[in-house]
Amino acid sequence: EVRFVESGGELAQAGGSLRLSCAASGLTFDDYAIAWFRQAPGKEREGVSCLSASDGSTVYSDSVKGRFTISRDNNKNTVYLQIISLKPEDTAVYYCAANTMRRLCSRFLIYEYDYWGQGTQVSVSS
């Protein structure tokens, strides 16, 4: 059984930082493209960051570029999302997801990601 467990979300102040974690069992993160998505209240889920398995390349959405960093610890089979300079508009539930059809990140197509975590809430106060 594949299971992802996200953690690290909390209430934070604007300008602060957080590190989200996504630990996997039943699937090896290093074999697939892994992404972080987020969904704010009343908005569609959007992809924010992706880490390729093939070459370790990363992709970021324009809204988070320069503030978010995705990384992977293969020994712990865990993917991280480091967020700095938090903004109120970063408030959302953050999900990690695996695309078992690809090793290389491409566009953030939700339907291509077949395994998802339960999400972790990030709330940013101004």
Image (tube, helix red, strand yellow):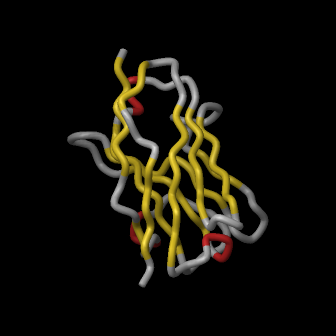
Identify which residue is drawn at 64% across, 58% down: 51
- Give percent across and percent down for residue 113: 45, 70
Identify which residue is drawn at 51% across, 18% down: 15
Identify which residue is drawn at 23% across, 40% down: 41
Give the vertical position of 28 relative to 16 (above or below). Answer: below
User: Quadrant of residue 9 in the image?
Assistant: top left
| Front position in the image: 5 or 14 | 5
User: Quadrant of residue 14 in the image?
Assistant: top left
Identify which residue is drawn at 65% across, 32% down: 66
| Front position in the image: 122 or 39 | 122
- Give percent across and percent down for residue 10: 38, 36
- Give percent across and percent down for residue 39: 33, 47
| Front position in the image: 105 or 16 | 16
| Front position in the image: 1 or 35 | 1
Of all residues shown, which one is farthest toward the bottom? 1
Of all residues shown, which one is farthest toward the top? 126
- Quarter in which the N terminus is drawn: bottom left
In-image side of 46 versus 32 (left or right): left
In-image side of 92 versus 98 (left or right): left
Of all residues shown, which one is farthest toward the front? 76
Of all residues shown, which one is farthest toward the left? 42
User: Quadrant of residue 83 in the image?
Assistant: top right
- Give percent across and percent down for residue 42: 21, 41
